[in-house]
Amino acid sequence: MKYFFLVCLLAFSGSLFAQTDTKDWVYEYTNGKKYAVHIAQAGNTLWGLHTTYNVPVDDIVAANPGIEKGVKEGYRYLIPLGGADMTVASGTTMREHTVEKGETAFSIAKKYNSSVDDLLKYNPGIDKGLKAGQVLKVVLPPASGEIPPKQPEKQGAIMTSVTFTDTVLVYEVKNSETLYTISKRFMVPVNDLQTFNNLKSANIKAGDILKIPLKKENVKQVSIREVQPKEEARKVDETLIFKAKNKYNIAVLLSFGFNDSKVNTGLRNLATEFYMGVELAADSLEKLGFDATIKVIDLPMDSVGIMKVLNTAEMKDMDLIFGPLVPQSADIVGRWCGKQKIRMICPSACNSSLLKNNPYIYASVTTDMTQQEILAKYTIEKFKTAQIILVNPGISKDQELFDAYRKRFIELSRKNGNVKLIEAKLSDYTTFIRKSGESVIVLPTKDKGTVLSFINSLHKAIGKSPNADVTVMGVKEWGGFDDITGYYKTRYKMTWASSSDLNFSLPDTQTLLRLYRKKYRADMNKAGAHGFDVVYYFVKTLLMKEEVPNEVMNAFDLKAAVPGGGYENRSCFILTHQNYELIRVGVFYE
């Protein structure tokens, strides 16, 4: 069937593994016993759970009724680890956290949405101070929308006979996959994969064929006595799993301002351009056989008007909602979606608080902090031998950016030979620049005046050291500072991380541009390309359950932001200036 785009002109009166690193484990304490909580992903097996956690197969089967039918994606399994090491209320979940330099009890509790009182309760003595490297037990809040785990069955109720036979899976590497992510999925150590495939390194690419050694399991049950029917109560709320339908209902919430004077011209144009990309995505999806009614709604800006739109029978019947583009409106719609258990895609930057305890939200735009974390990762990978200088801009609103880069750099440095990081101020950073050799200067600030002053002082200092090789790293907002000339951008190879990159030289972009011009007789901009990417990607992955090899101007890699919360895009592009052009270095993932 055809798509139906219905733009409603509303007038109102008055207005998404395998856990091998113990520091990543989440623990649950039940009836005096300690369990590791494992959320299964595609490819997990009973043998994999056994080898990953080093727990007998019979114990895993006994603690998880229904697992004998196979490990199911999205289910929540409890892996018995023995007696509890402390007195904890039954059903409490915890994570072990390693204290880093500068962290406090308050900051740690805030990170996990926990409380300082619980930290003090389960970690006696920390009121006297924390030490870097100290391991704390942090109580986690209940996961929103998750069915409570069933109490483990008593031993002896069911006998299981488990046998394993060697088998080999022939697997084609997908786009963006690494040997590490494949090892996580199939619960096979990276070293085993390398040895089995005669790989000299861990480098693989899309299309490569791997042989994965697995264990094929045969689990038989022998009833000792009559038992009550068992319900499978360990999987995530079924509303989080899309059920296949012949036809879907999708809403796109955009503020065109047909009946709302609060919508300014800029937002109207943005909504219109985004909508044009949505139309192109729908055309492409229809050609693939996808059937849906897509309703585009003109959303008011005020909360009363928004709720009038949402509280209709039609909206409650939606399978997926895209928008709004405004963070304040997205907060209102997102909270409503959480209560109604309807998935919502945030196409623009949204408040991180919206993701907490709301597993129905997908944030498609990488946050500023994540971009700085990825920039830190890129710095360590690319500039290990350089003099790396992190400059504190001394501006309170930029402090989170500075802290995000610094914290992630230090974490990765420990794993990469302790790469040195020099912390400096705007008043003294030039003293650390190598007179001959490579230096990297990182200034995480959005303040235009600070950036211009920094460039002037840098250029003056470099004039005295003609052999200095300097790379400057900042934030994506620098791209809009016209006062920074192309000469400076190229001279200092200015680099930043960005959640998007509209590059018209790429084949996928050129293809979409031709479709855009043919349909609208106009040139495509970022809003149109983003509208296409967001709708095409999330419909195809969530509803059609198919992979999207490449996006036009985005790189989507959605991961849970916090336990029991929504999903945040954790990938972005690294862009750098070369020969007076902004060049895409590549896609990096956090």
Image (cartoon, helix red, strand yellow):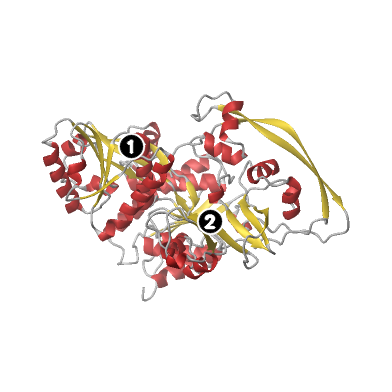
Neighbour class for label 2 at 10 Å: few (<14), some, many (≥20)?
A: some
Q: Can residue 344 be seen at all in this image of the molecule?
A: no
* Nearer-the-camera pick, 430 or 321: 430
Residue 224, image x, y percentages: 88, 54
**Which residue is identified by label 2?**
96
Q: Is residue 285 left or right of residue 465?
A: right
In this view, which residue lies farthest toward the right?
225
Q: Nearer the viewer, mark 2 or mark 1?
A: 2
Circles 2, 1 touching at the beta carbon (< 8 Å):
no
Residue 366, given in percent of the width and then of the height, sits at: 39, 50
Choose top left, top right, bottom left or bottom right for residue 150. bottom right
| 421 w.r.t. 385: above or below | below
Kind of residue at disc 1: Asn
Q: Is residue 377 visible?
A: yes
Quarter in which the C terminus is drawn: top left
Residue pictured at 60% horizontal, 57% vertical: 27
Q: Secondary structure at mark 1?
A: loop
Looking at this view, is 192 or 245 the one in front?
A: 192
Q: What separation in Å lies between label 2 and label 1 (alpha carbons)?
A: 43 Å
Kindly indicate the quadrant of the structure image that contains residue 122: bottom right
> Could you tell which of marks 2 and 1 lies nearer the N-terminus?
2
Which residue is the site of mark 1? 503
Instruction: Between residue 535 and residue 247, name the one nearer to us.
Output: 535
Amino acid type shown at disc 2: Glu
Q: Residue at x 55, y 46 (%)?
A: 21
Image spot of residue 104 (x, y percent): 41, 62
Mark sitting on residue 403: none
Q: Is residue 281 above or below residue 563?
A: above
Q: Is residue 540 left or right of residue 58?
A: left
Residue 342 screen position, x and y as percent: 54, 60
